[in-house]
Image (cartoon, helix red, strand yellow):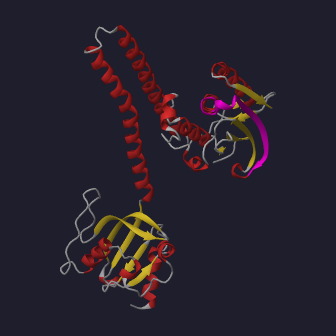
Amino acid sequence: MTQDLSRRITGLWDGVPVPVLIVDSRARMIGANSAARAMFGDDLLDRPFVTVLRQPAVVQAVDWVLKPGQYPAPTPDPALPTPAEGAVRLRTVIGADGRDLAVEVTVSPLPDKLAGGAMIVLQDRTADEQAEQMRRDFVANVSHELRTPLTAMTGFIETLRGPARNDSAARDRFLDIMEREAARMNRLIHDLLSLTRVQSDERRRPATMVDLPLLLRGVVATMSPAASAAGVRIETQDIDGSQRLPADPDQLVQVFQNLIENAVKYGGSGGVVRVTMSRIDHEPLLRGPGWAVDVEDQGEGVDEMHLPRLTERFYRVDTHRARAQGGTGLGLAIVKHIINRHRGRLKIESRKGQGSRFTVILPETLTRG
């Protein structure tokens, strides 16, 4: 293999955005495009392929493509499209750049005029695998959340048809519990539909101009009776006047109702929930000015270890307490996606025993992206 031919082989694939490795008939490296060098390092040429990628299934595929009569054929993956004749396609996990990557590997023979070797193409499917795992987790969580109230209701129905058929006191008590469980399932389904709608709209920027202080005053007025019934006072600061921002008014109402409701439920022991609005001259992530709305409580707070996961679907710090208070575990996930649609930021600050502060930062003007 001449250096000139090696350069030509590498040059053929340098513009391909996925890693491509080229080996000769002896399974020695004779070419690697820029994506492959970024993944495995620059010192790749004139090395045995097995020293570059030590995954046994990939090595077996390369051996078979180079010398199909001397090595056993790899088992085809029925979930993948059938490769061209003489080629192998497989899925595996490789270690590269200090992390594990789920990849789809295609090993194809090269013509004799290109050294009669093989081309190994790696397509990173890690994001696809993670998305599929998230989908499986989501289905499992939804199933669990629905199964619990359904199991309870089924048990009560059987009891009412049997031992408690003529017990009016038990019947009334069971019917009250069944009504609460049905309401819980209804809230869960409503939040699931809401999350789906929010995610479907997330790529579309809202263009309606909304008076943010007026909207906040409306939300506070709506939430105050429930807060008072829970023994909590909602205080406001700097939400007078007028300030128009590009936003979806219904979604922002949903955001602030959710945050205030959570502050009342979980931070109500402090007796006060404070809603404050302030201007930010320059927010780096927004690349310009913005407006911040703080919803702050003086309750028990949350341990800092939980903060990064609070916006995950169905994640709860205290599962029993959340369910007892009617939470579905989807509220903050909906808030996160709505704020993402507005190209804003959600900041969460909390310490155990010192209350919590949720800050929504919205851009002042409509920008591209």
Along the line of sight, which residue is nearer the eye, 190 or 21? Answer: 190
Quarter where residue 268 is shown: top right
The extreme bottom residue here reads 2
> Along the horizontal axis of the image, is 318 left or right of 164?
right
Locate residue 41, reporting x and y percent: 50, 78
The N terminus appears in which quarter of the rendering? bottom left
Along the line of sight, which residue is nearer the eye, 130 or 110? Answer: 130
The extreme left residue here reads 69
Q: What range of the chain is rendered magenta?
A: 263-283
Residue 256 visible, this orientation: no
Name the residue rendered at 45%, 78% in the picture: 32
Locate residue 284, reporting x and y percent: 73, 52
Locate residue 137, reporting x and y percent: 40, 45
Locate residue 8, reporting x and y percent: 45, 82
- Residue 307 colored magenta? no
Name the residue rendered at 69%, 32% in the picture: 270
> Along the horizontal axis of the image, is 86 left or right of 47?
left
Residue 366 higher or lower than 132, as above or below: above
- Residue 266 colored magenta? yes
Along the line of sight, which residue is nearer the eye, 292 or 111? Answer: 292
Name the residue rendered at 45%, 79% in the picture: 10
Name the residue rendered at 75%, 48% in the picture: 288
